[in-house]
Structure formats: C-alpha cells, structure tokens
Image (cartoon, rainbow, N blue to C red):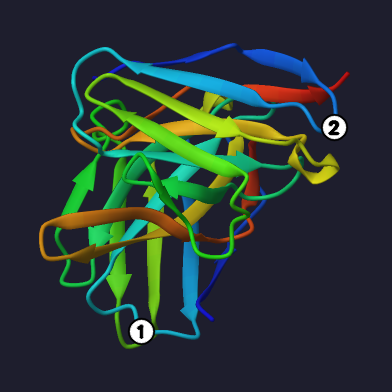
Amino acid sequence: QVQLQESGPGLVKPSETLSLTCTVSGGSINNYYWNWIRQPPGRGLEWIGYIYYSGTTMYNPSLKSRVTISVDTSKNQFSLKLRSVTAADTAVYYCARTSQETSVYYLFDYWGQGNLVTVSS
Amino acid sequence: DIQMTQSPSSLSASVGDRVTITCRASQGIGNDLAWYQQRPGKAPKRLIYLASSLQSGVPSRFSGSGSGAEFTLTISSLQPEDFATYYCLQHNTYPYTFGQGTKLEIK
C-alpha cells in the first residue's frame, strides 16, 4: 500500500521560506506525478503544483513566482519550497500522487495526512 | 483559470436520503473531473475519477455522472459516515481547480 508522509516545520516567520518534504513508501516514486495541495483553515483546496519523477514541473500561476518543487528519487522523496511567506500562506499542506496510463491521468489517488504550517512571528 | 462552482454549498439530509451535488465548470472539461470526500481533520479521499468511474473500495451508493461542463455526484442512500465535505476537481486545464466544497450535514 502506497503511503505519503509530509514533514517539516509547523511554524514559519513572515518573509521566510516554507520547506516541506513528502516521503513515499510502499511504492516507487518513479513514473508518477507528485503534487502539493494546500488548504487554509476552514477553507477549500488549492493545487500548488507537481513534479514528475524525471524532474518536469508545473506550477499554479498564482504561486509560480515563489514556488519550487524538487524530487530526490534516491530517497523516494519530493519537496516544496515557498518563499516570502505571509499569513495568507497559513494552511494544511498535503502531498498527493497522480498516475498516468497512456494519455489518461488519474488525479490524487493517494494523499499524505497533511502538515499544518502557520506563518507567524 | 477554469472556475468550478458547486451547489449547494451546504446541505442538510437524513440517513437513508438520496442526495445530489452539482459541479459546473466555467468551460468544457470533457470528463476530466474527480470527486473527493473530506472528513474533519483528514485528507481528502477520492470517490470518483474521470467523472463516473468509482474508486476501488468506495461503496456503490456513490455515483458520478456528466461531461463537458456539468457534473453530479449522487449518494443513493446516505449513511452516517457520509456526512462530510465534498469537493470536485477539474484536471483538464492548468491550473487544476477545485470547487468550493459542499458540506453535508445531518438533519
């Protein structure tokens, strides 16, 4: 059974960089797309972006200038960096998997449990 | 961005009721739509993919339909564990976008 686990600080100061890692277990990181999604407290879901195991990325334009997603296939991990954070970036951050068969994409079949990150001084 | 509009935003229903949630896209998305259930404090769980395909392990009382710009999620007979928030997601065009959610509450 594939499992995803987010890890990282729960508190980040304004203007600093939020850094999270998602560790994939029970399966390979290869041949899949790996996503970050966030949810501010009491609000809806926002897709941040993905990285393919080969390193190709796609970001939400609303965050693109501040986001970097990277992958380390040797550790079965991928990571999120969000720069210059403000209180508006306070959210639960989830990692999730997308799979592909031929030209069909299967979005977010596995999720991590979420990591609450609060931006506050 | 494609806007996904769910209706209703909240819904009160009783165990055994049949409920339908609608998701409308601001432009056609084919069948590139998924439905997720989220219980409080938990990660979303996929129920339906490609508009009408039931995720393995999800009870058959859940069904999805639609294509193009209008989609529905139907729960044929509500069970106590179904009271949660439901989200649609379009993955036809970047950026992927979710509906605002429908909170299903016990009447």
Q: Residue furthest right?
A: B107
Q: Is residue A86 visible?
A: yes
Q: Is residue A84 visible?
A: no
Q: Assign a secondary structure to mark 2.
A: loop
Depth check, front residue: B27 or A76: B27
Q: Quadrant of the N terminus of chain B?
A: top left
Question: What separation in Å lies between label 1 and label 2 (alpha carbons)?
Answer: 41 Å
Depth check, front residue: A82 or B3: B3
**Which disc, if any, is residue A28?**
1
The residue where tag 2 is placed is B15
- Amino acid type at circle 2 is Val
The picture quadrant where one finds residue B20 is top right
Q: Is residue B86 left or right of residue A58?
A: right
Above or below, comparing residue A28 to residue A58 in the picture? below
The image shows residue A95 at horizontal and vertical percentages of 47, 56
Q: Is residue A36 left or right of residue A106?
A: right
Depth check, front residue: A47 or B86: B86
The image shows residue A119 at horizontal and vertical percentages of 62, 35
**Label 2 marks which chain's residue?**
B
**Label 1 marks which chain's residue?**
A
- Amino acid type at circle 1 is Ser
Residue depicted at x 38% and y 43%: B52
Depth check, front residue: A78 or A1: A1
